[in-house]
Structures are given as structure tokens and as C-alpha cells.
Image (spheres, rainbow, N blue to C red):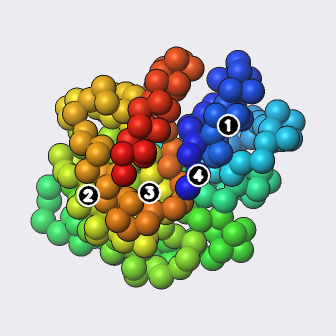
Amino acid sequence: MKIGTGIYLEKLNQNPDFYQEAYTCLELQDFVMPNNLDENRDSLIDQYTTVLKNYKGLLTIHGPYIDLHPTSFDPLVRDVCVQRYRQALGAAKALNAKFMVVHSNYENITHYAGYETYFLQESISFWKNLIKEFEASKVTAVIENIHNKNAHLIRSIIDAVDSPYLAACLDTGHAHALGKSQLITWVESYGQHLQYIHLHDNNGEQDQHLPLGEGTIDFQVFFAKLKEIQYDSVMICEIFGEIESQQKNLKQLEILMKQQ
């Protein structure tokens, strides 16, 4: 299993030795910002290439999501989403990143009749049109749950597109605080589609990105389920805070994994 962290270049440069020694995977998150896909992209790629030139771990990126709606009624809005994903995919390919995280964009405040059917159909169409570009780049897109209540819609998209380069990212904090759901139900539903995890804790009400054990998520049950399915892919610690918080989280993670 690859244990990693979400990182921005500014934070990485503050202590590159810690991040490269403590983690076997780094999720580069600068590319969520529009300006980092336009005028700053080439510079970011060059700087990451330099600072990580001796890093032996796995690299992944977090794709853009700000104001992007791949299932929009407006085709021009969908076109912008495709353009941004392509720009991020180009960065992933240049950095030899193997995964790109994308948000599901499911809206929990949308209650009109037929919304979930529409969301599913448009998501399938969007990814069937785009997935060949990920396949050609050998980058796996992983769809992250945000406001999703369960795994059903994301799993259905992945099943319908039927590509080894489209998989699921389970965000533990989002499932707990925003989805109000049990983590093990997501793991059971995803099965082998689960290839990526965002790991963090919260109080069940807010998306706080706390170190493990500081919120109310039952991680012992979660890790027992991961052991049961022999999960052996990527786990990204998405903890807010400085190195002290990272170190505290890693200690708790080590305890949880040894208990299984």
C-alpha cells in the first residue's frame, strides 16, 4: 500500500526532506486552481520536477473542480470542464503521475424529479467521451465522493464506462460529514473499483480534515474492512495543519494498521 499526503509546492518547499521521507506517495494539489492550469502550469511542472528529482515514491495529482460542472445543462460549461481536465491530465503526464482525482459533482441540494437519473446519464456520457485520453496517457481518473450519500452513482458510472483507467476515490471525511454514511458500506459497494482513499477525520458535521482519532469516525472498523478486501492501493492523508499534525496522524495511522 502507498501511504501519501496531499501537498502544495509551497508547503513541500518548506520541508522537502520530511515529505519525501515520510510518504511513499505525494498527491500534488496545486492544479485545482485555474491559474495553475494556465500561466503557472509549466513553471509548476518544472519546479516539481526539480525538487522531486530523487523521489522514488508514486506521484498523483488532484484535478480541478472550482466552478466545473461536467453534467451541466449548458454545453459550453461542459466544454470548459473538458478543457480543464485536459490541462490537468497534461500536467499529470509531464510529471509521470499515475492517478488524477476528480470530484463527482453530485449536488445534494438539487431535488427536482429525475435529477439522479440525469446526473448518471450525463456523467456516463462525459466519461465515455474523455476516458480514452486517460487511457492513452496511462493515468487513472478516480472519482471522489463529495456530497454523495452512498457509492451507488459513482459505482454505476464506473461500471458503465468500463475502463481500467476509471476508478473510485473514497473520501472518508466527506462520507462521514457530508454523506452521513458508514464507511464500510462504501468499501463493500466499490469492491475492486476502490483504488484510492482520502483519509481524514471530522466531527460528523463539518469537513474538518483532522488527524485520525480527533473526530468521530470509527477507523478500527474501516481498517478491518480494508484488510478483509486486501486493499493494497493508494491512501492519501489529507490532513490540514503543519508537520506536527502530519506526524501525529502518521503515528495514529501506524497504530490502527498494526491492530488489524
Question: Quick one: 70 or 249, which is closer to the camera?
Answer: 249
Question: Quick one: 80 or 105, which is closer to the camera?
Answer: 105
Tag 1, which secondary structure?
A: helix
Question: Based on the displayed image, in which of its 4 quarters is residue 132 positioned?
Answer: bottom right
Tag 3, which secondary structure?
A: strand
* Amino acid, disc 3: Cys
* Amino acid, disc 2: Ile
Indicate the position of residue 79 as horizontal and vertical percent values: 54, 60
Q: In this view, does 111 lie to the left or right of 23?
A: left
**Which badge, 2 or 4, is on the more N-terminal residue?**
4
**Which badge, 3 or 2, is on the more N-terminal residue?**
3
- The span from disc 4 to disc 3 (Cα, nearest Å) is 14 Å
Badge 1: residue crowd in 10 Å (few <14, some 14–19, many ≥20): many
The residue pinned by badge 2 equals: 184
The residue pinned by badge 4 equals: 2
Indicate the position of residue 158 as horizontal and vertical percent values: 42, 74
